[in-house]
Amino acid sequence: MKAIIINPIELLTSLLVIPSISKSEQEKSDFLVNFLKQHDCDVQRHKNNLFCFAKSYDENKPTLMLNSHMDTVRPSDSWTFPPYQPTLLDGRIIGLGANDAHASLVSLITVFLMLKDTEQSYNLLLAISAEEEISGVNGMESLLTVLPKIDFAIVGEPTQMNLAVAEKGLMVLDCVAKGQSGHAAREEGVNAIYKAIRDIEWFKNYQFEKESDLLGAVKMSVTMIQAGKQHNVVPDACAFTVDIRVNECYSNQQVFDIVKQYVEADVTPRSFRLNSSAIDLNHVFVKRFLSIKPTIFGSATLSDQTFMQFPSVKIGVGDSARSHTADEYIFISEIEEGIGLYKQLIDGLTLR
């Protein structure tokens, strides 16, 4: 059979010119459907998500999923290069999504096409997700409902091709401290701001008992606060928002239950969906990686891993520090390295 030849840099620049802000990925999804069909892939679409298997699916084999996302954040006003016109400069490609996570995406697509006609001990699945940047319900969470059983996943996010073996979860709490309104000139009312301060101090200072060797402590940050309507009225309500990054020692529900024990304000979680994850360090893929590079870590940032109730790791091209920044870029050499390492890690891998 004729070998598949793909130019990942050409594919990357073709993708970068197509806007794909979360929930608006249809045009990019259309492009990728056509691209994969042109490369003899039986690509399936679920909403704006795409997936396809290498060769024929064998239910007696385990399934390995390669995943990255096609959506991006909105470009900030600080961009000095046109975000949708890829710019090649000093070995870098500058463009919105170049680093997060289109470089990982094109690298995984390349490796999938390189291996799709090669017999493996597993089913190889390529899954391209939408709405990752907002953890949207129509992204990976929805896609998993139409996929068969998955035994292991590689999630392509910028990690400098180091291996994230754990990832913090996220829970956002909306809190309302309640008081009683009164005239600010007299000793009237109960100031809700002062009641909120006590709870905010607790969020600032509380230390959870279980710390992770990989992810450290659970981190709670009060990030928004709102109270009062005019200067001479004691406010009867003070609303504040708490961002909580949860290590793998706790579920989001467990953290919420602890918060409720100590906080006086009314506390409402936006969801319990985005839990932390971790993989057994004795997993065959982790061992294979460590035989090549001794660089595993725990990631503070969230990805589609949060929806995967099966072993998964995060490893990808680029640097997380560049994500969501103006003039985001990727080095061409990073893509070349990523393709080589991805292939080395999965070609011939035995999951059972």
Image: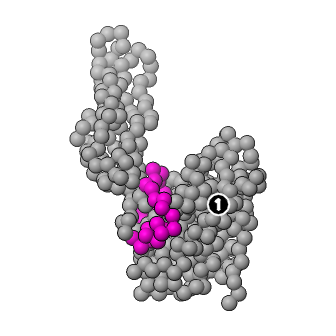
103 or 223, which is in the foreground? 103
Decide which of 334, 293 is in the foreground and name it.
293
Q: Left or right: where does residue 158 sit relative to residue 296?
A: right
User: Hey, which residue is sitting farthest left in the picture?
Assistant: 261
Please say whether residue 110 is visible from this viewpoint.
Answer: yes
Name the element at disc 1: helix
Q: Residue at x 32, y 49 (%)?
A: 211
Nearest the eye: 78 or 143: 78
Locate residue 258: give its quadrant. top left
**The residue under label 1 is which amino acid type?**
Glu
At 44% from the left and 34% from the top, the residue drawn is 224
Q: Is residue 34 above or below residue 218?
A: below
Please tell me whether residue 324 is drawn above or below residue 316 in the rendered image: above
Horizontal placement of 270 versus 137: left or right? Answer: left
| Start-end of magenta stretch | 283-308
Q: Which residue is found at the position 47% from the left and 87% from the top?
A: 58
Membership of 194 in magenta stretch: no
What residue sits right under mark 1 in the picture? 334
